[in-house]
Amino acid sequence: MIELVTLFGGGGFVGRYVAQELLRQGVRIRIAQRVPRDAWFVKSYGGLGQTQFVAADVTRPETVARALEGADAAINLVGLLSDKLQKVHVDGARNVAQLAAQSGLKALVHVSAIGADRGSPSEYGRTKGEGEDAAGSAFPGTTIVRPSVVFGPEDDFVNRFARMAQFLPVVPVIRGSVKFQPVYVADVARAIVAAVLDPGVHSGKSYELGGPEVVTMAELNALVARMIGRMPTLVPVPDIAASAMARFGSWVPGAPITWDQWLMLGNDNIVAEGAAGFEAFGIEPAPIEAVAPGWLVQYRKHGRFSLTGKTA
């Protein structure tokens, strides 16, 4: 029986929803975070004594070992978009898996991403792929979960589009034809929790999680604009201009896109044909239009007082 689960990165975007789902099911959790106070808000999700906190850095094995003491299972949610990708995605994943095995844990879920491939031209995709291999080798029963682009109230994807559509009359669209399968963060959390609480069924397996709809980058931009009642002009950015912008963005802080992100946009981010997914957990994922308007209302001209379906 799984009674205590250590969540590495439990205070992050996906982590807070995983924590909430575990607490809802009566499981005790230990949030392992580099700066524990950044995750203290999670304590309000559960009952008295249900949540613990520990300072841990996946690149420092001694802190990982401390975070795993007495735990029955662990979930590694730690990931970066840039900087120290090798140390975090690969070395960190190996540290967690090796120490989970040494500690005799019953289950380990490693959260990766669609596009993880050790042969990827992007450092993000390559290190995510190598991280999966490292975790699986060190802890053979590791369950790999690969979501597509995750959306939710705290995301930096759909909200970024909404902010641009809110203020800009013209919105540039990079790689408008690339496809995504946006997936709701709460659905991803439910799948992760189901995997860690039932290792007898899910141990050693891999799952790709995508929402019910496949949309292009351009279609997603237009959809978000429509949901906030805006009608900006969407202008495709030619690849030659976008690639130059990405080269520039690799060394300029705050640039709209980096070279590594540009490389990742070279492939569709959708569930592979034949891959196991939400159906393995009995979960029907929510479409973006069913949940996103609830928080995107903040970007409408008159907020919650605007008329649904009316343009600003």
Image (spheres, helix red, strand yellow):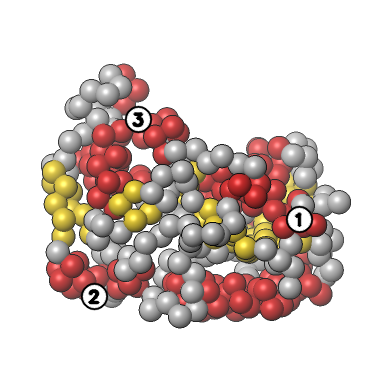
Q: Say which residue label 2 marks.
A: 247
Label 1: which secondary element: helix
Above or below, 12 relative to 139: above
Q: Quadrant of the C terminus?
A: top left
Question: Which one is closest to the eye, mark 1 or mark 2?
Answer: 1
| x and y, in percent, of residue 309 in the image | 27, 24
Q: Nearer the viewer, residue 263 or 35?
A: 263
| x and y, in percent, of residue 50 in the image | 77, 43
Q: Earlier in the sequence, mark 1 or mark 2?
A: 1
- The circle drawn on residue 143 is none
Above or below, 230 relative to 113: above
Q: Would you say residue 274 is visible in this rendering?
A: yes
Question: Mark 2 and mark 1 in contact (Cβ < 8 Å)?
Answer: no
Q: Name the amino acid, label 3.
A: Val
Q: Residues within 10 Å of mark 1 (few under 14, many from 20)?
A: few
Question: Mark 3 and mark 2 in contact (Cβ < 8 Å)?
Answer: no
- Residue drawn at x 84%, y 68% as measured from the top left: 104
Q: Would you say residue 67 is visible in this rendering?
A: no
Q: Nearer the viewer, residue 200 or 294?
A: 200
Question: Which one is closest to the eye, mark 3 or mark 1?
Answer: 1
Q: Name the amino acid, label 1.
A: Val
Q: Say which residue label 1 marks.
A: 201
Q: Say which residue label 3 marks.
A: 297
- Residue drawn at x 39%, y 75% as measured from the top left: 122
In which image quadrant can residue 232 be found?
top left
| x and y, in percent, of residue 274 in the image | 54, 59
Distance Cα–Cα, label 1 vs label 2: 45 Å
Q: Earlier in the sequence, mark 2 or mark 3?
A: 2
